[in-house]
Image (spheres, grey):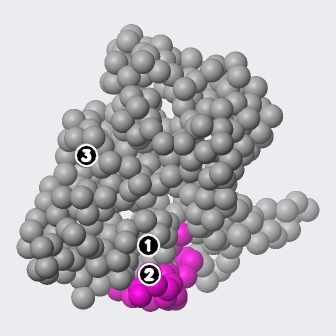
Amino acid sequence: MGKALIIGAGGVASVAVHKCCQNSEVFDEICIASRTKSKCDALKEKLEGTTKTKITTAQVDAGNVDELVALINKEKPDIVMHLALPYQDLAVMEACLATKTHYLDTANYEPEDTAKFEYSWQWAYRDRFEKAGITALLGSGFDPGVTGVFTAYALKHEFDEIHYIDILDCNGGDNGYPFATNFNPEINIREVTANGSYWENGRWVETKPLEIKRTYNFEGVGEKNMYLLHHEEIESLAKNIPGVKRIRFFMTFSDSYLTHLKCLENVGMTSIKPIMFEGREIIPLQFLKAVLPDPASLGPRTVGKTNIGCIFQGVKDGRYKKYYLYNICDHQECYREVGSQAVAYTTGVPAMIGAMMILTGKWNKPGVLNVEEFDPDPFMDALNKWGLPWKESYDPVLVE
């Protein structure tokens, strides 16, 4: 049916590649491209002979628009799935505009030299994508991504109006390391050490990093401490969900993780400001990333489960209602299926599904759009089919 150019060869991209190859009826062909072509070749070698999907590979610098345009013109994909770093979002979007090719990512743009991430840079492309007649689907991972689809589904089927949304992201996995991150260390640490924020009564409320802590008992995982963070889907949901009064995002962290992170922060290792070391300029956080375990290597040793979902409060037929939509994912089951841990799995599967929505025409609207702006039903059906079945509760415990 269609061809996808998948940019990236890390944990998330690897899952998406596996899932595209499982879904050969939609993905006739994929090209895997990365700065390090050998990683792409390894994925191709692993999957060839197990799928009807034709696999090719290429080398590309995802921050170089000219290289991207040349590759897209050569491969002629129907969609570009950008699953590398969010620093490169705008370059890939420019290349898609130049070639009139659909675009998808899993995380919003952030400048490499500033610990700030928001949708404004990408939303500024809306008119250009509309005029080009192509779609840029933003944030088609889990959070952002599935959390937005969950919200659209809840609004369509369960509520007349949603007033409160709490997004809860729990990783109950144990990888055996005293300190390691389950996705790109640089992005993860920038996110956690930034100020938190939430949306309430039409404005942003900013908090200090990890200032707000709650404890929640997660099905399949148990009781965990979770902390309020800024997260990009708060921004898009605040814009796209009418009548919403408050949106918060919480993520769980172990005491060991936070203790190590605080020590590293205290000695300057989480800084993104360049320093001179032995006559050359380095960025401490990038050096730290180089010495930490590669998240893509954590699959064999990670045990436990993730539980990610949304608790909604609002009104239906004039009456107050609460509702919880969530997914539980087992790290070892993910590894047995695709060779990756659950954090990569829960992001890579929705990336494939988002691309499938566009290739099959189920989501067909030119412009720059977030997932909650489309009909959630076909995406929700696909979650059940492709490895992320959802659960629901009509009497959840609320977050205070």
* Image quadrant in which the C terminus is located: bottom left
Which residue shows up at 18% across the image and 58% down it?
157
Span highlighted in magenta in the image: 191-213
Disc 1, disc 2: CB below 8 Å?
A: yes
Q: Earlier in the sequence, mark 2 or mark 3?
A: 2
Name the residue carrying label 3: 377
Residue 74 visible in the current orientation: yes
Q: Earlier in the sequence, mark 1 or mark 2?
A: 2
Check residue 103 for magenta coloring: no
Disc 3 crowd, CA 10 A, few/some/many (<14, 14-19, 20+): some
Name the residue carrying label 2: 199
Measure the C-alpha gap from mark 3 to mark 1. Answer: 21 Å
In screen coordinates, is 325 left or right of 225? left
Relative image position of residue 395 (x, y in whole percent) = 8, 73
Which residue shows up at 38% across the image and 22% down it?
26
User: At numbered mark 2, what does the secondary structure look like: helix, strand or loop?
Assistant: strand
Name the residue carrying label 1: 238
Residue 260 visible in the current orientation: no
Q: Earlier in the sequence, mark 3 or mark 1?
A: 1
Residue sitting nearer the eye, 307 or 200: 200
Measure the C-alpha gap from mark 2 to mark 3. Answer: 26 Å
Q: Amino acid at mark 3?
A: Asp
Which residue shows up at 72% across the image and 43% down it?
94
Residue sitting nearer the eye, 171 or 1: 1
Tag of residue 55: none
Disc 1 crowd, CA 10 A, few/some/many (<14, 14-19, 20+): many
Give the image quarter of residue 270. bottom right
Relative image position of residue 63 (x, y in whole percent) = 73, 44
In screen coordinates, is 213 left or right of 381? right
Q: Is residue 271 above or below residue 151?
A: below
